[in-house]
């Protein structure tokens, strides 16, 4: 029989940050202007992946792939037509009619955060992403650890 998992709690500082984020009304939340993720990217299924930094600029509504401080690829957020989780730990974007970009983030947390942002953007290109939303995701873990 497997041992029961130990109950884990967030530290006090994290709890305070989450509670503070929950208390902020929607109209007073802080909009995120830029998000960055270290990823590996492929431009065809089965092609070797190359390192890129994904820079999502919400001010200009652009998704940029950066390598050595140079923008290698740039797409308007409005051109992302489809986002899905692909294989075990990858995201598949369809840009425009049929251009495919395969993204492999460094961690499962990055995968989930990036997927959430890209999925939100594809559903509504103008929706603001707020800093408090990322902290609110931690509330889910607090509930799990308390059970």
Image: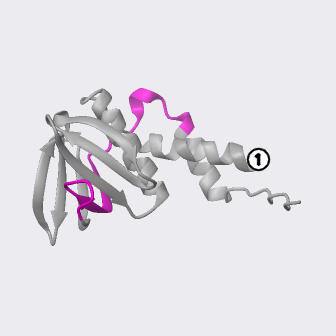
The answer to whether 61 appears left or right of 4 in the picture is left
The answer to whether 139 appears left or right of 51 in the picture is right
Asked whether residue 58 is in view, the answer is no
Q: Residue furthest bottom?
A: 68
Residue 121 picture location, percent across and down: 29, 35
Crowd rating for badge 1 (residues with CA inside 10 Å; few <14, some 14–19, many 20+): few
Residue 83 picture location, percent across and down: 32, 39
* Position of 86 relative to 42 (above/below): above
Q: Which residue is mark 1?
A: 146
At a point 19% along the width and 55% down the height, the residue shown is 43
At a point 18% along the width and 33% down the height, the residue shown is 78
Residue 21 picture location, percent across and down: 52, 41
Residue 3 picture location, percent across and down: 85, 62
For label 1, the SS is: helix
Tally of marks? 1
Tell me if residue 87 is in the magenta stretch.
no
Asked whether residue 10 is in view, the answer is yes
Tell me if residue 36 is in the magenta stretch.
yes
Quadrant where the N terminus is found in the figure: bottom right
Q: Residue furthest right?
A: 1
Quadrant where the C terminus is found in the figure: top right
At a point 30% along the width and 55% down the height, the residue shown is 103
- What residue span does the magenta drawing correspond to? 22-47
At a point 42% along the width and 53% down the height, the residue shown is 111
Is 25 or 77 nearer to us in this picture? 77
Instruction: Write down the quadrant of residue 69 in the picture.
Output: bottom left
């Amino acid at each position: 029989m497997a041992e029961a998992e130990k109950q884990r709690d967030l530290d006090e500082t994290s709890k305070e940050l989450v509670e503070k984020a929950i208390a902020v009304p929607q109209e007073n939340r802080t909009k995120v202007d830029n998000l960055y993720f270290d990823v590996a990217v492929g431009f065809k299924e089965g092609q070797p992946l190359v390192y890129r930094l994904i820079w999502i600029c919400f001010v200009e509504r652009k998704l940029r792939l950066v390598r050595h401080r140079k923008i290698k690829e740039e797409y308007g957020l409005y051109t992302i037509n489809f986002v899905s989780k692909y294989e075990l730990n990858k995201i598949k974007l369809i840009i425009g009619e049929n251009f495919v970009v395969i993204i492999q983030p460094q961690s499962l947390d990055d995968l989930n955060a990036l997927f959430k942002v890209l999925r939100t953007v594809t559903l509504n290109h103008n929706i603001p992403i707020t800093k408090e939303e990322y902290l609110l995701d931690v509330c889910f873990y607090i509930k799990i650890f308390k059970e």
